[in-house]
Amino acid sequence: MHPKFALPALAATIALTLAACGGGVPVTPPDQRPDTATDTGPNTRPNIRPENTPNNTPGSAPLLPVPRPTPPYMLHPPADASGQTSPGALPSAPLAAQARKDAATRTREPARAPMAESRAMAPSAMRVMPAPSYLPAPAPQDRERYGAIEENGVRQVAQAPVSTFSIDVDTGSYSNVRRMLNAGRLPPADAVRVEELVNYFPYDYAPPTDGRPFAVHAALAPAPWQSENVLLRIGIKGEDVARASLPPANLVFLVDVSGSMHSPDKLPLLKSSLKLLVGALRPQDRITLVTYAGTTRVALPPTPGSEKTAISAAIDQLMAGGSTAGASGIALAYQAAQQSYIPGGINRVLLATDGDFNVGITDFRQLKSLVEEKRKSGVSLSTLGFGTGNYNDQLMEQLADAGDGAYSYIDNLMEGNKVLVSEMSATLATIARDVKIQVEFNPATVREYRLIGYENRLLAREDFNNDKVDAGDIGAGHTVTALYELTLTNRPGLIDDLRYQPAASVKAAQDRAGELAHIKLRYKQPTASTSQLMDVVVNAQAIRPLAQGDADFRFAAAVSGFGQVLRGGKFTGQWRYDDVHALAQAARGADRFGYRGEFLKLVALAQSLSTSAATTGATGSEEAPPRAAR
């Protein structure tokens, strides 16, 4: 036989033999094979970011997880909620072991009819066993949640001359952004709240000298990203109170000990941070530990600050495990705070968690309403955020707002020391409540303005004089900074005048042509229900060249610009990270605690990550919006 016909003939002979024996290997025709390229099984996940979903309006919690590939900078696979590493696409050890066990079991099973038939096959026939199926481990999930931020736009003074907002002393956004940059990725835009970046840093504003709880300062200089515009800085400095002079503190730490808190950057870091606080407690202070997971309990009853050994031992006993019943924990913590309430003292609940509530009341609005109701008891609530992957930033920030407290994110032990030890007075002791700012701009001198940040602190104009409207509180020694970008009337604005409407009259403002703005503040004393008013007039003659501005002004401007660039740079034109670095470097000053030096490193890191993202076409931030033209 010719060699070219030998193999087909042999194949035909084998096929006929197998058919006669009733065995063989079935072959599925190509047109009947399943299309594996369009798999929509349970392991297929849409690549949707919660901050980009159309249903995410301000105040609502994102509903979808954010699947992300393992970044190239990770030397080891990421850890899951239990603290174990996820090996990505490779089969896990238990799966592989089970597959081997299943295969061995199949070879030991009693003979069944099909195998009996196979024994009748010709000796040369082979039984083809299916290969064990290895299921890939699920891709690591990023379920972090951030409230949507609609960046403040430019307003015409002729149409809206008054801007009103509540002060904000939160700093959580800065340390959370730092955590992401140090992990090798740019933050999503909604994780960047510019005012929290600016207010993370202390500034050397003059303290009050007139008996008021805080002093207000205004300064003007050209905006670094648009020199034809003017930057108005409003600086507030709270009265300093020595730690020894603080009222006695009744502190209830509500600690999340659920399974999601197992990883080293969560409960272990929290315990180390609490140990630092123990050393700073005074004998007149009392501390209570309430824990919650699937159930809630009092892990440490109210204990004087002098019993440091007992407090430390209770902290050491905290262990993670179970689900997360956050609402019941909040209720028990407030109950404990009421039972040990100190009249005239500091009465505060401090919630330490990753915010991943999954048992009991889990709805964002219900939790916020619960805290708003509980604050009427005279006990405030602050939040301490921990962890990654499932972190709920929106919940933590809004609960602190509802509880008349401050929101901090602790990403390392240095931050734990900053929040709980070195800035304890500002964190715990309130010197002024419900502080609101209202700025009226003079249409004779200011054409347009833009408030930088504070998007979720905006108030209606009529809210300023309404003492029933809640606002932020100022702690002892706190500094608060707010920045406006102004376009003066001698410069073209971003908004065109209307064609069919007459220009607004500025005749009444001509009598005060030298004024740019009138700043008013309302606040309440810690135990008062009626607000007091103070005001500052800002004159155009106060404008100074940026280089002649004080170091605090220039550094705050640099931090503000950094936050705006991270968010996409909608209003900063061609200003970039290297411009931020140059301005901040020149304004670093004494930098007693090294915070500004660390900021410079983060700016350089963001620039490197941005360059890498532009090269590879991938970025952790949302797509930058179009830049404003001038």
Image (cartoon, helix red, strand yellow):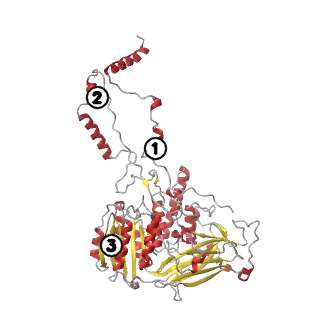
What residue is drawn where x is 25% and y is 34%? 107
**Alpha carbon distance from label 1 to label 2:** 33 Å
Residue 502: image location, x then y, percent: 76, 71
The image position of residue 43, as x and y in percent, is 42, 46
Position of the C terminus by quadrant: bottom right
Mark 3–mark 1 Cα distance, whole angstroms, equals 47 Å
Q: Quadrant of the N terminus?
A: top left
Front one among 133 and 327: 327
Residue 228 location (% of width, % of height): 68, 69
Residue type (three-letter) at the residue carrying disc 1: Thr
Report if residue 71 is visible in the image.
yes
- Considering every residue shown, the one lying at the far bottom of the view is 210
The 10 Å Cα crowd at callout 1, few under 14, some 14 to 19, many 20 or more, is: few
Residue placed under numbered mark 2 in the picture: 114
Q: Which secondary structure lies at badge 3?
A: strand
Mark 2: which amino acid? Answer: Pro
State the residue at coordinates (28%, 39%): 102
- Judged left or right of residue 117, residue 81 is right
- SS for tag 2? helix
Considering the numbered disc 1 on the image, is that residue within a helix, a strand or a loop?
A: loop
Task: Determine whether, in the image, residue 504 is placed left or right of residue 244.
Answer: right
- Mark 3 or 1, closer to the camera: 1
Image disc number at residue 289: 3
Q: Nearer the viewer, residue 389 or 556?
A: 389
Q: How many marks?
A: 3
Mark 2 or mark 3, whichever is nearer to me: 2
Q: Residues within 10 Å of mark 2 (few under 14, many from 20)?
A: few
Q: Which residue is labeled 1 in the image? A: 40
Q: Amino acid at mark 3?
A: Leu
Q: Is residue 593 visible?
A: no
